[in-house]
Amino acid sequence: QVQLVESGGGLVQPGGSLTLSCAASGSIRRIYTMDWYRQAPGKQRELVATSGPTSTYADSVKGRITISRDNAKNTVYLRMNSLKPENTADYYCYLKGDNLDYVGLNYWGKGALVTVSS
């Protein structure tokens, strides 16, 4: 079993910044990628950023969001700057890897709510 625990969500004013964290624990042999997705009210879940060998970003967030990963801690971060009300969403962490038996892992966190409002 693998657990993903997200933290750092909350209320922030437009133009503000926020950093989300997602820590993975459990029977993990190797992590291929830990990514961030978001789902705004009434919309489909969308990819925000990936932390594979090369980080990638959705066009809508380039320049304002930075993803980073601490491999020693199995933790991925999402630093968000210049936040806008339309960035309000539940932000989900996703992990792809394999466990000690070399069985593939695909796990989602429970989400961290980010609300951008004055």
Image (cartoon, grey):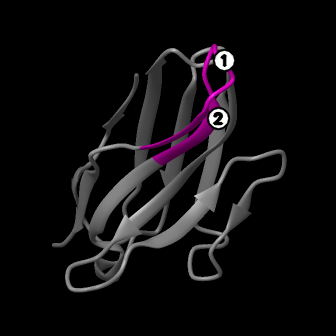
Q: Where residue 78 sits: x, y (%)?
A: 52, 48
Identified by mark 2, the residue type is Gly
| Quadrant of res 100 | top right
Q: Residue 105, labelled with which disc?
A: none
Q: Where residue 19 sits: x, y (%)?
A: 43, 45
Q: Where residue 68 sits: x, y (%)?
A: 65, 41
Q: Is residue 52 or residue 88 the one in the foreground?
A: 52
Q: Residue 29, labelled with which disc?
A: 1
- Tag count in the figure? 2
| Quadrant of res 31 | top right
Residue at the image point whose x is 35% and y is 81% from the top: 44
The residue segment tinted magenta is 94-107
Precedes in sequence: disc 2 or disc 1: 1
Q: Is residue 1 left or right of residue 60?
A: left
Residue at the image point whose x is 69% and y is 23% from the top: 102
Number of residues whose C-alpha sits closer than 10 Å to that of mark 2, classed few (under 14), some (14–19) or many (20 or more)? some
Number of residues whose C-alpha sits closer than 10 Å to that of mark 1, classed few (under 14), some (14–19) or many (20 or more)? some
Tags 2 and 1 touching, CB below 8 Å: yes
Query: In the rendered view of the protein, which quadrant contains the N terminus?
Result: top left
Identified by mark 1, the residue type is Arg
